[in-house]
Image (spheres, rainbow, N blue to C red):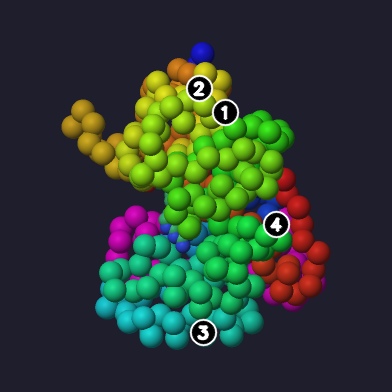
């Protein structure tokens, strides 16, 4: 079997067009455009690229983008003071602090300082609690994008056996909650899991979020399974730098029913679901009914 390729870029483009179409309606009602603030601390090259892409995409869709680039030497108090200012700024509907933060800064304390109504990254403990309670809060961007791709590929997810490999608050935990909310039977695997190959082999849905290049081997994949690869690692292959995921794509594509590529799978959805969340947050803040774009 050769898997069909889940085209995250095309899906994200389609979602972007729908989001852009909703902005004039918001503007006519609120007298302003939805505002997204993105904060970068330090000079991590990948983070710089992601933050630039977020600002560019927000502007392209017709939103107002507020970008803050702070030096590596920024203190916790300075960062918290900026978050407090953004919380109080009425033009700003969503706040995202790019992760990872430089050493010495406490990311959990920073995301907890964000007004939950503006938590477009879904990382505030209140957002996580609402997701776990089945309440309509903000959902972390990457897991939300994965769920959209899974539902577009499989339709209903109810009753399916799923494994999430990874338990971070950014991806693994919210991903497992989203699958559970759709009546999947969910296994969460992590670095201490015994017999990972055997557990992956039982799953109809595999979500790989471990951050280790090609760790999930193709021969582990159950024939016909749907594989969602969240990893992005730069490795050297045949003397060239290559971007790969957490899944051994060449092996998995021969067994899976459908699979996301890296690049071009989950990554573009992470940016677009941020736009989605920012516009949803804007609607909630001004009391306008939320659009549904799926
Ligand atoms: N506060 C947050 N920090 C981070 C998040 C997040 O959701 N919130 N996610 C990641 C990084 N990230 C967005 O911030 C991100 C990662 C990857 C991509 C992407 O489009 N990847 C491309 C490949 C790009 C390349 O060549 O490097 C792809 O997969 O096609 C977008 C966003 C960590 N931090």
The residue carrying mark 2 has its beta carbon less than 8 Å from ligand 1: no
Please name the residue that numbered disc 4 is placed on. 134
Of marks 3 and 4, the one in the foreground: 4
Label 1, label 2: how far apart the Cα atoms are:
7 Å
For the residues labelled 1 and 4, the Cα–Cα distance comes to: 24 Å
Determine contact: label 1, label 2, CB under 8 Å. Answer: yes
Numbered circle sitting on residue 84: 3
Position in image of residue 228 (x %, y %): 51, 36
The reply, left or right, for residue 17 in relation to residue 264 is right
> Which SS class for mark 2?
loop
Residue 235 at least partly seen: yes
Foreground of the two, 33 or 85: 85
- Secondary structure, mark 3, is helix
- Provide residue 62's location: percent of width, then percent of height: 63, 62
Range of magenta residues:
21-50
Q: Quadrant of residue 39?
A: bottom left
Q: Which residue is mark 1?
A: 204
Q: Which residue is mark 2?
A: 222
- Which residue is found at the position 29% from the left and 74% from the top? 104
Q: What distance separates the C-alpha of mark 3 from that of mark 1?
A: 44 Å
Quadrant where the C terminus sits is top right
- Spatial CA span between label 3 and label 2: 48 Å
Q: Secondary structure at mark 4?
A: loop
Please say whether residue 41 is one of the residues in the magenta stretch: yes
Q: Earlier in the sequence, mark 1 or mark 2?
A: 1
Residue lying furthest top: 1
- N-terminal of the two: label 3 or label 4? 3
In terms of sequence position, does the residue under pointer 3 or pointer 2 come before the other? 3
């Amino acid at each position: 079997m050769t898997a069909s390729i889940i085209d995250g870029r095309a899906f994200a483009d389609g979602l972007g067009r729908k989001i852009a179409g909703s902005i004039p309606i918001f503007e006519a009602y609120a007298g302003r455009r939805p505002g997204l603030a993105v904060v970068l601390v330090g000079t991590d090259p990948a983070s710089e690229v992601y933050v630039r892409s977020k600002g560019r995409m927000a502007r392209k869709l017709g939103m107002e983008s507020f970008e803050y680039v702070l030096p590596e030497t920024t203190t916790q108090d300075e960062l918290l003071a900026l978050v407090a200012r953004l919380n109080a700024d009425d033009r700003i509907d969503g706040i995202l602090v790019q992760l990872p933060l430089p050493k010495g800064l406490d990311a959990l304390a920073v995301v907890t300082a964000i007004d939950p109504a503006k938590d477009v990254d879904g990382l505030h403990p209140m957002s996580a609690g609402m997701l776990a309670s089945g309440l309509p809060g903000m959902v972390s961007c990457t897991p939300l994008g994965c769920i959209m791709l899974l539902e577009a590929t499989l339709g209903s997810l109810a009753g399916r056996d799923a494994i999430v490999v990874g338990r971070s608050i950014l991806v693994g935990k919210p991903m497992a909650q989203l699958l559970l909310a759709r009546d999947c039977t969910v296994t969460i695997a992590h670095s201490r899991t015994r017999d990972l190959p055997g557990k992956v082999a039982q799953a109809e849905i595999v979500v790989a979020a471990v951050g280790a290049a090609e760790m999930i081997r193709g021969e582990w994949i159950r024939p016909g399974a749907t594989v969602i690869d969240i990893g992005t690692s730069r490795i050297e292959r045949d003397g060239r730098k290559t971007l790969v995921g957490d899944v051994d794509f060449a092996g998995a594509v021969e067994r899976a029913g459908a699979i996301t590529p890296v690049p071009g799978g989950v990554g573009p959805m992470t940016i677009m679901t941020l736009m989605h969340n920012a516009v949803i947050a804007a609607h909630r803040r001004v009391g306008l009914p939320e659009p549904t774009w799926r």
